[in-house]
Image: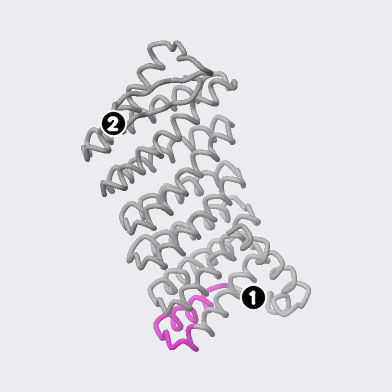
Amino acid sequence: MTGKLIWGKDVGIIWIVAGSGISFVNENELDEVRTIEEGFKKAYSEDLKGTIEAVNKLRDFAFQLIHLEADAENELDLKALIISIGDIARVASETKMEQACIVSCRALGDITLEAAGQKREPLAIKALSVIGNLALEFAGRRLDAAAKGAAESLGDCGKNASKMEMETLISLSEIYLMQVVLKSMEKGLPFAGIAATGFLGEVGVASAKQAIETSTLEAAVILEDLGNAAIRENSESHAKAVIEALENLGAAVSQREMKNVIVQIAWSLEILRVLTLEQGLKGACFAAKAALESVSTTGLLDEAQNLERIREIKEFHSLILKKR
């Protein structure tokens, strides 16, 4: 399937262009092309069942290719399939078929993890990036269920990447989840942002269980920033979601005795407690106080007050937020 795929909505065909002519392809490649064409047709005609069937078939094609020799042609073919699934999902979002959007992100998540499991990290990163961009587009279009579904796929990828100790994928999933929360708050979505906050916390917990301190600390720092944003927006529901995620992360971190992360979480909860108190968000303030009391900082108070430690945390905080 080398070359460039060109799909014409009006004429309903796909050409595979190689240079100035049309390439010859085998039957399997033609089947992939036909499925891409069918996926676009079904999405434009608002055929939910047909769109989902096409996306799942493209997912299966991708799985087959992932297990073949990883040469340049194979890489190009896989990227074409990943991009096609993403583009079909975009068409589905235009026609408000949120279930097709969710299935598309789930398929891309499966491809991400399969590629990661086969040590094909560039492909895994590509597929995960498509999910992240789709999640932001869905939120931008105020498709709450679709954005929530995409966030769930990001969370699943992050958690499984933690088990495989693939820190690039973990970090990418955390950053995209942060962006989904912020976009959801901006667009006033009632569910996607709160769900994405929970998924971000779960990625942090998964990293803590694998003793991946950098990824765990990154999750804590991002959660603090999201809490600050929620308080600025006077969104108590989002603030409480952040506090709950930090509390759960604190419990996981305490079991692993990650002192730096415990300090960061305690710091974050105290900041959020003070800010919610100032804003009059009584429910969130009470939740932050209770969460802070539950985080075990025994023997760490001197460390928390140590100026050098605080400086290091601030520098890390600044580095993480630059990824936005």
Say few, some or many: other residues with alpha carbon within 10 Å of mark 1 (under 14 / 14 to 19 / 20 or more).
few
SS at circle 1: loop
Q: Position of residue 233 (x, y in %)?
A: 44, 76
Q: Residue at x 69, y 70 (%)?
A: 314
Q: CA distance from mark 2 to mark 1?
A: 68 Å
Q: Earlier in the sequence, mark 2 or mark 1?
A: 2
Front residue of 38/265: it is 38
316 part of magenta stretch: no
Q: Dot 1 corresponds to which residue? A: 298
Q: Position of residue 135 (x, y in %)?
A: 42, 51
Image vertical order of residue 213 relative to residue 7, above or below: below
Front residue of 282/303: it is 282
Which segment did they paint magenta? 276-295
Q: Dot 2 corresponds to which residue? A: 10
Does the CB distance between marks 2 and 1 fall below 8 Å? no
What is the three-letter code of the residue carrying label 2? Answer: Asp
Q: Residue at x 27, y 46 (%)?
A: 99
What is the three-letter code of the residue carrying label 1? Answer: Thr
Drawn side of residue 120 relative to residue 127, left or right = right
